[in-house]
Structure formats: C-alpha cells, structure tokens
Amino acid sequence: MIGIRRRFADQFILAIVVLLLWHYCSPWTIVVQKRVDLSDTRSNPTVANELAAAVGSPDTPQETEQMKEDIEQKLGDSEETFLKLVGRPSSPPRLSRDDAIRLIYDSNGGDDWLDLVESQDDHGLMALTKIVQRYIYEKQHPSDCGSQRYLVLNKFPGDDAFGLGAIVQRISDYLSVAIQTNSVLLYATDTSPGEHFISEDGTGSCRRSLDCIFEALSNCTSEAQQGLNSKTQSIFAGRKLDLDVEAFLAKHKYPIPFVFEEALKKVQPDITGEMLKYWWRAQAAAYIMRFNRNASRRLKQLRLGEDTKQLGIQWDVNGDPKEVNVPFPIPEGTISMHVRHGDKGSEMRLVPFNDYVVRAEKFSAENPLGYWKRAFLSTEDPNVIEQMRTMARITPFSYSGSNSRWTWYWTDIPRLNTGPETQLKEFGNRTDLTIKWMLQLVMAIECDVFVGTRGSGWNRLIDSLRCIWLASCKQPFLEVGFENDWIGYGP
Ligand SMILES: *[C@@H]1O[C@H](CO)[C@@H](O)[C@H](O)[C@H]1NC(C)=O
Ligand SMILES: *[C@@H]1O[C@H](CO)[C@@H](O)[C@H](O)[C@H]1NC(C)=O
Ligand SMILES: *[C@@H]1O[C@H](CO)[C@@H](O)[C@H](O)[C@H]1NC(C)=O
C-alpha cells in the first residue's frame, strides 16, 4: 500500500518537473515571447530603461510628476472644417503614371510634393491622402511663426542602432502629438534624430539633421532648437503646455491624431486599431520623407547612372543572357522584390530569395495579360544579387506566365549583409549612402507589383510610400512572410 502511494508521489513529482521544463524550455514559449518583445519594444527592458533614463531628467522630478499625461480630445474649428472635406467627390488625375514618377526626381521641395499628391487619382491612393497631406503641411507651415507653440524633438537615445524606417516611425509619434496639441514639430539642431544617416562634415544650413535629405518639417524655426540637454527627449517652446509627451506616448500605443481617427471612422466605422496605426504611420512617413531639392537632384543623377551603375539582364530567344539598360521610369507591369536579409535574422524569419521568385512566378502565371516576368530587385545582401544573375526561372515553362525568363534590373550600390550602422561606417559619406538607399526605395515604388515581407520596416516604407506619393495602393502586394506581419509590429 505504502509502496503504491510512494510510486504515485514519485510519478506526480516527475510530471510536475516535466511540465515545468516544458514551460520554460519549449520552443513555443520562446517563439511567443520573442513575438511579444517584437510587437512592443516598450516591453524590451533595454529600450525601456534607456527611455526612462532619458526622459526622467533628475533635476526636475516634481515637475514631471505633476505634468499631465493626456491630451483633451476635442474638435476645434480647423478640425471641424477638415471633417467636412471627408467624402467629397474625387477629382480626376492630372498626371500620368510616368510623369508622377518623374516629378519625384524633379521635385523642388515644398509645394511640389503637395502638387504630386493632389495630381493623382484618388482611387489609387490610401484613404483621405490628399486632404490629410495638405492638413499636415498647413499645420507645419503657419502664416505667422511668432505666435506658435513648438514641439522640439531631440535625438533618440541609442538611435544610432536604428534603421531609417524605425527613426521615421518614432518621429511620426511626435508629429501626432504636435498635431493634437496645436504645435509645430521641429528637430533639435545640436543632436538631431537620425543624425547617423548624415555625414559628419555636416555644415550648411541643415547641420547634421534629416533636413539635409528631406524637406524641413516646417518653415518656422525656434531658438529652442539649440542647446537642448541630451537627457531631454522633447520640449514645448513658445506657448507652454502642461503635457508630459513621453508619458503620453508610453500610455497610448496608437497615437494617431484624434481628428484623423474621426475622419477615418466616417469612411469605415469599424476600422481596426492596427489599421489606424498603420495608416497614420504611412501618412506621417510620406510627409517626413519628402526629398529636398538637393536630394532629388542627387537621386536623379544616380537614377540615370551617374556615379552608380544601373544594370539589367535579359535572356534572348535562344536563352542566352545579355545586358540591357534599365529604362526610366521602370516600365509598367514590372515587379519589385525587396529581399530583406542583413541583420534582420535576429528579429524575424529570413525568407530565402527563391521563395520571392516562386511567389512572383505564380502571380505572373495567374495574371499574364497585365504583368511580365520582369523585376527590379533591391536587397542589402550581395549573395542575393549573385543568385539572381544566373536565375532564369524556377517553375517549368508551361506554367510560367507571359514570357519565358526573368528580366532583372538592379543598382550597383555598395552592399554588405549587415545592419545599417556597419554599412554607414564602412562606405564613407553617410549622406550619399542614405540617398543611394532612398534611390532603391523610389525605384521599388516605380514598379507595379510588390513582393516582400511587411515584417521589415523597409518593406513597410515601400508599402506606405507607393500609396501616398504614387497612386499604386491598389496594386498587389505579395507577402512572402506571415500575412499579418503588419499587425503588432513595434515600437
Ligand atoms: C510658410 O509657408 C506658408 C505656406 O506656404 C506661408 O503662408 C507662410 O508665409 C510661410 N511662413 C514663413 C515664415 O515663411
Ligand atoms: C543644398 O546644396 C547647396 C549647394 O551645395 C547648399 O549650399 C545648401 O546648403 C544645400 N541645402 C541643404 C538643405 O542641404
Ligand atoms: C556627401 O554626399 C553629399 C550628398 O551627395 C554631398 O552633397 C557631399 O558633398 C558629400 N560630402 C563629401 C565630403 O564628399
């Protein structure tokens, strides 16, 4: 009797031990935890600590505690006027596809970007794009700078390790706060967000800020842009405001301006929270990343093959590969493939290049009248370029769509299969390398079909900009990762 009870107790303890081991060591637990970390960097202790260290400036503890963490959500006159514009009939496009692409390279900054957006077919753009881009522009370009409130944004702690997509995403959060608090968003000038993308010799009026590549956020300036303490993430200047911006952002995961949320709900009442976030980050990115005149000029030089090589391979009727030029703009029906490798393996599953090609071949076989087996390839992985050069097709001829073999286009930019900072250190002029990456982004959106994975910030940028700068939002995006990768990404 005692023997049986002993054996039962032993088995019970063994079962508990096995369960505990399973709980802590099971690959499922690890995967689930990893995705949670990814979807919310605020749960990532290092980032959270850095932010806390940067935000909790030690000399003003009481003041921080007393500051409000919320913005009163009410609609003023300008918001009501804006909401009346929702649902107006669309206007016909004034620019052809090719002319719209050319305008990106010929832009003189400022109004040209509004003109680009407003000249396109509403039906090809993301919902509300025209009125939202104009609203942001007008908020950031007031007629009188003297009476404004400013929100000045300093460099993010540890942002040297971030890609451009992540930096722009964070700036979007502050742009949202600025719009909701009736403030104009400006960058600090001593240490500016994303300064590691700009060459160290930064003289000129833009110092070492994103203004060296993109249009300034505003045509106003403020003295508060200078002399910001490195521990201060952001401050209000001009008219003061009792709001702890960092506490507000930590509390609200989807800081879309209230007025835009109201407007989108007029279009689609059951719009999801994730969609509100994705939509806003796309609108904000398209505004923040309007190239300035200098950057557009440089982009065009590079696009036309000056200081860089635009390369193409096409197979002739005998199946022999020959070199061809890359047309400008990229011809209709071309497929963009952005293969994200580099340092991303630490954060997401890397998809092999073959999977991209198989996916695109299936699409081209299903849609032979509209699309060719012709692709522009962008990647930071030189091995992918090598693989592509010899890849004529994967699936057999009989299933392979409108033409036999792939035509490949690519740009001969410096590539290293690593993260952005290593490449920026390695290849000299940071500003120029960043512009070369921008060129890859613009050439990708010159295309009509997009193969990629939205688990990568760069692919989300391609997905966003094609929907705002060009009327390509209803063109197919073929996901080679997980379908819902655009949901729950951080920060
Ligand atoms: C800023 O731009 C707006 C719109 O173009 C214009 O009305 C305003 O006068 C400009 N302000 C300054 C200070 O140049
Ligand atoms: C654009 O280039 C000119 C001439 O090189 C320079 O003087 C100016 O500061 C540049 N502007 C910006 C915003 O970088
Ligand atoms: C770095 O690149 C930028 C953009 O192309 C250019 O304006 C600048 O002159 C370059 N700086 C150096 C030191 O070559």
Image (cartoon, rainbow, N blue to C red):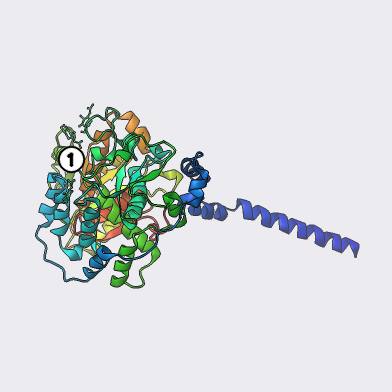
Q: Against 163, is 448 above or below?
A: below
Quadrant of the rendered structure where residue 419 is? top left
Going 27% across and 33% down the picture, which residue do you hit? 207
User: In this view of the protein, which residue sits in the foreground, 144 or 78?
Assistant: 144
Disc 1 residue type (three-letter): Leu
Considering depth in this image, is 394 or 140 the residue closer to the camera? 140
Quadrant of the drawing holding the N terminus: bottom right
**From the Cβ of disc 1, is ligand 3 less than 8 Å away?**
no
CA neighbours of label 1 inside 10 A, class few (<14), some (14 to 19), many (20+) = many
Residue 330 appears in the rendering: no
The part of the image, by quadrant, that contains residue 167 is top left
Q: Residue at x 41, y 36 (%)?
A: 229
Q: Secondary structure at mark 1?
A: helix
Is residue 107 shown to the viewer in this render?
Answer: yes
Number of marks present in the image shown: 1
The residue indicated by pointer 1 is 299
Ligand 3, seen in the image, is in the quarter at top left
User: Looking at the image, is 23 positioned above or below residue 212?
Assistant: below
Residue 161 placement (x, y as % from top left): 40, 38
Spot the residue most to the right: 1
Rendering coords of residue 65 (x, y %): 51, 50
Residue 409: horizontal and vertical position, in percent? 20, 45
Depth check: give the residue in front, 398 or 236.
Answer: 236
Query: Relative to residue 202, is residue 339 depicted above or below?
Result: below
Q: Is residue 194 left or right of residue 48?
A: left
Question: What is the x, y in percent for residue 282?
Answer: 30, 55
Residue 267, image quadrant? bottom left
